[in-house]
Amino acid sequence: MKPIRTLAAVGLLSLAGTSLVHAQSYGPEDEGRRFNDGSRVVCNDVEVQRNTSDPNRVGGTAAGAVIGGLVGNQIGSGNGRKLATVGGAVAGGAIGRNVQGNRQEANGDRVVETRCERVRR
């Protein structure tokens, strides 16, 4: 009984793998290539922005949180001071992340990439 189950499992896996065969990428060297189903490879130049080495904006968030926490610590006394410190750190982190994102967007490198895809008609 086990060999039949194993054979059935192998058959199902092979059928499942056939749908992945069609996932293929094409490059500029394939441009104009035609297929039997009438489709062809078309390439376009696309402008893409390359940001700096900190895409998650960790530096701006951390710096903003520290500065906001220090400013918040100067306000209030007792438990109010603790709450102001935490609030200042959260607000400063959000502001720092936003500022760094705006700077990265303004200073990011823009490059042109050729992207190719198979177009079906």
Image (cartoon, rainbow, N blue to C red):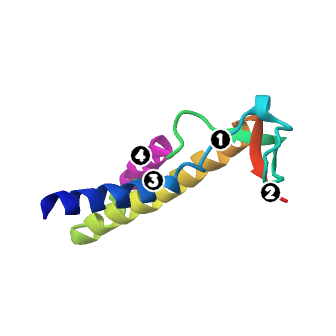
* Residue 112 shows in this picture: no
Instruction: Specify the segment rendered in magenta.
Output: 57-70
Q: Earlier in the sequence, mark 3 or mark 2?
A: 3
Q: What residue is pinned by disc 1?
A: 25
Q: Residue furthest bottom?
A: 80
Q: Position of residue 113 (x, y in %)?
A: 76, 35
3 or 4: mark nearer the eye: 3
Give the overall secondary structure of the magenta segment.
helix
Q: Calculate the distance from the C-alpha at mark 1 to the C-alpha at mark 2.
A: 15 Å
Q: What residue is pinned by disc 4?
A: 62
Name the mark on residue 17. 3
Q: Position of residue 16 (x, y in %)?
A: 43, 59
Circles 3 and 1, Cβ within 8 Å, touching? The answer is: no
Q: Secondary structure at mark 1?
A: loop
2 or 4: mark nearer the eye: 2
**Quadrant assignment for the N terminus:** bottom left
| Residue 51 in the figure: left or right of residue 39 | left
1 or 4: mark nearer the eye: 1
